[in-house]
Amino acid sequence: MQAFEANFDGLVGPTHNYAGLSHGNVASTSNGSALSNPRLAAQQGLAKMKALADLGFKQGVLAPHERPDVASLRRLGFAGSDADVIVRAAKEAPAILAAVCSASPMWTANAATVSPSGDTADGRVHFTPANLNNKFHRAIEHPVTGRILGAMFADETHFAHHPALPAQMHFGDEGAANHTRFCAAYGARGVEFFVYGQAAFDAAAPRPVRFPARQTLEASQAVARLHGLSDEGVVYAQQHPDTIDAGVFHNDVIAVGNGEVLFHHEKAFLHQDAVLAELSDKLAALGGHFQSIEVPDAEVSVAEAVKSYLFNSQLLTRADGRMILVVPQECQNTPRVWAYLEKLLASDGVIAELKVFDLKQSMQNGGGPACLRLRVALTEAEVAAVNPRVWMNDSLFATLNDWVARHYRDRLSAADLADPALLTECRTALDELSGILGLGAVYPFQR
């Protein structure tokens, strides 16, 4: 049976703003307090989704979350009407208000870890929402993320859903941003590659010192067990601590994989040669031929990779078997990175084409093309079992652009987060959106 890799992009939410909440994410912290444009951010994301759908790739939409998250504020002691809660939080704890207003669910690479049916013991696609325990504004996401994924992938014959791991630092889980799958074909058995920042239960193990290691080995191992993965089909690797301290907060900021190819920086992993050898050996045992494309530090430094988000790209297989690399416009604006990419194309290797997208609104908050999408490998039968209303097409594109134009502001500052009307606007928009996408009552205010 034919199989595909589908991408489900996060639709930017109405409260998209720059609060600089993500310590360790250089772009996020450096643009804190800048003025955002939620409408343009959503339009930029939709344009990317539609462009890839038009190229023949299976492209879906993941809905944003309700923000501000008034329920979280109530759990922290703010009381009264919803408007009273927001006004009081703005006065007494503006940093907490900013956190519960974050539109961070747009970065769906952190929504969950997904294992395709070809790899799992029960032959179903498995989903585990990420607990995102390292940051408060993200740790509040997984209950709604789980409900949205459940509404999209509802058929229990084909899909299995797990709760998030325990919300504790030893099991810090950042989802697919630290997970890649290698395979000879999307429907074939593959090798799942889990990348972590530290072994939480081993105090003597190497770890970064400047920025946090958000993913733990223990979390990756737990997800592999939950998904019923075999030892022969799993490789664990540690991010190089120095690259985390340079601003590489997730593996998808320093490496991207697809099919049999890993495109990565010279300083991506600790004990890199051994990691690449293990990937090659395990994929070969399954009939695949692993290929590493290593970018030398002498040609693109880690700092340039972080600045341009060269590796926070999408690597997509064309019908002819060669690949497209989807990069943000910042790569074109970074001379040494663009020179490397032009050289890569001229080498006539497996990466045959570049697609450049303007995602500045997302990029200024530290999220590029790869951050915006969750990859799900699906057979034809599984594609047919997905909620059909979430697939991108001409009609949905027009509907969502109209929806954005009617509900989103074109500017949002930190001061605007204190406006109770923003909550009403968000709820009105999401109530309509849940109908458009056929999600049912996934939001707290609907339940």
Image (cartoon, rainbow, N blue to C red):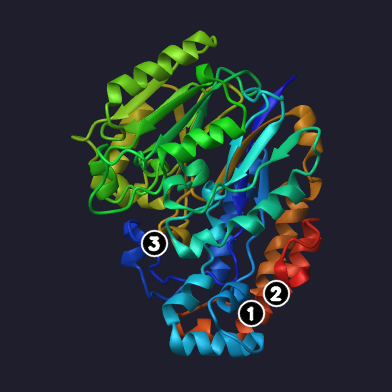
- Mark 2 lies on a secondary structure that is helix
Badge 3 or badge 2: first in the primary sequence: 3
Residue 416's place in the image compared with 193, above or below, is below
How packed mark 2 is, by other alpha carbons closer than 10 Å (few <14, some 14-19, many 20 or more), is many
Residue, disc 2: 427
Is there a contact, CB below 8 Å, between mark 3 and mark 2?
no
Tally of numbered discs: 3
Is 6 situated left or right of 324 in this image?
Answer: right
Across and down, in percent, residue 422 comes to 61, 81
The span from disc 2 to disc 1 (Cα, nearest Å) is 6 Å
Across and down, in percent, residue 139 comes to 51, 59
Quadrant of the image occupied by residue 404: bottom right
Residue 73's place in the image compared with 92, above or below, is above
Residue, disc 3: 22
The span from disc 3 to disc 2 (Cα, nearest Å) is 25 Å
Q: Which one is in front, 85 or 293?
A: 85
What amino acid type is highlighted by mark number 3?
A: Ser
Residue 275 is at least partly visible in this image: yes
Q: Which one is in front, 397 or 290?
A: 290
Across and down, in percent, residue 221 comes to 49, 33
How packed mark 3 is, by other alpha carbons closer than 10 Å (few <14, some 14-19, many 20 or more), is many
The quadrant of the image that shows the N terminus is top right
Across and down, in percent, residue 378 comes to 69, 31
Residue shown at 56% from the left, 58% from the top:
105
- Mark 3 lies on a secondary structure that is loop
Badge 3 or badge 1: first in the primary sequence: 3
What amino acid type is highlighted by mark number 2?
A: Arg
Residue, disc 1: 423
Residue 56 is at least partly visible in this image: no
